[in-house]
Image (cartoon, rainbow, N blue to C red):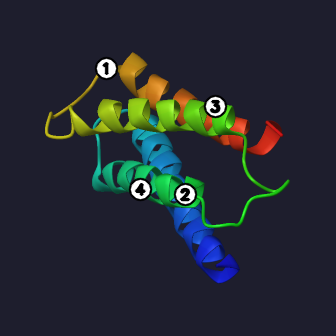
Amino acid sequence: MEALRLILLFIHLVGFALLLGGAITQFLSGRYRINPAVLWGAVIQLVSGIGLSAPLRGGGDDEPDPIKLGVKLLFAVMIFIMVFIPRKRESVNKGHFIGIIALTLVNAAVAVFWH
């Protein structure tokens, strides 16, 4: 089970890199459009995050806090909606793009700092 958790964690980090890297690249280019990297990153983050939160372990002290998982799921769903709905538009608002980047960073901060 530990090997499966590590594989899911690796996939989750790849999704984070795609989501944040794609969004920052688009933001710095000045063309605020949902590119495939951002879309796939959001999908990978959501799916692998749900997989990571599944009760694969037998319980004990190493189980994640259910409140933390709920907060992270809320942010992941919000990011996914913000990416999925305007994915076919030629451009989105600058504030919309800043929101995607900010929520992605907040979600990562929750993962790292909430114990």
Q: Amino acid at mark 3?
A: Val
**For the residues bearing labels 1 and 3, Cβ distance under 8 angstroms:** no
Few, some or many residues within 10 Å of mark 2 (<14, 14–19, 20+):
few
Q: Which residue is mark 2?
A: 54
Disc on the earlier residue, 3 or 2: 2
- List the residue tagged with mark 1: 93
Mark earlier in primary sequence (4, 1) = 4
Q: Tell me if mark 4 has few (under 14), some (14-19) or many (20+) residues whose alpha carbon lies within 10 angstroms of its own.
A: some
Which mark is nearer the camera, 3 or 2?
A: 2
Tell whether label 4 touches label 3 (CB within 8 Å): no
Give the secondary structure at mark 2: loop
Residue at coordinates 15% horizontally, 34% vertically from top-left? 90
Sequence order check: which comes first, mark 3 or mark 4?
4
Does dot 4 land on a helix, a strand or a loop?
helix
| Residue that numbered label 4 is attached to | 47
Name the kind of residue labelled 1 in the image.
Answer: Asn
Q: Mark 3: few, some, or many residues within 10 Å (few <14, many ≥20)?
A: some
In this view, the mark in front (4 or 1): 4
Q: Position of residue 36 (x, y in %)?
A: 28, 55
Residue 3 is marked as: none
Q: Dot 1 lies on which element?
A: loop
Residue situated furthest bottom in the rendering: 3
Residue 105, position as x, y percentages in the image = 62, 36
**Mark 2 in CB contact with mark 4 (< 8 angstroms):** no
Residue 103 lies, in percent from the top left, at: 54, 29
Kind of residue indicated by mark 2:
Ala
Q: Are the residues tagged 4 and 1 within 8 Å (C-beta)?
A: no
* Cα separation between marks 4 and 1: 26 Å
Quadrant of residue 111 in the image? Answer: top right
Dot 1 or dot 3: first in sequence order is 1
Q: Which residue in the protein does label 3 denote?
A: 106
Please state, as top left, top right, bottom left or bottom right, where the C terminus lies in the image: top right
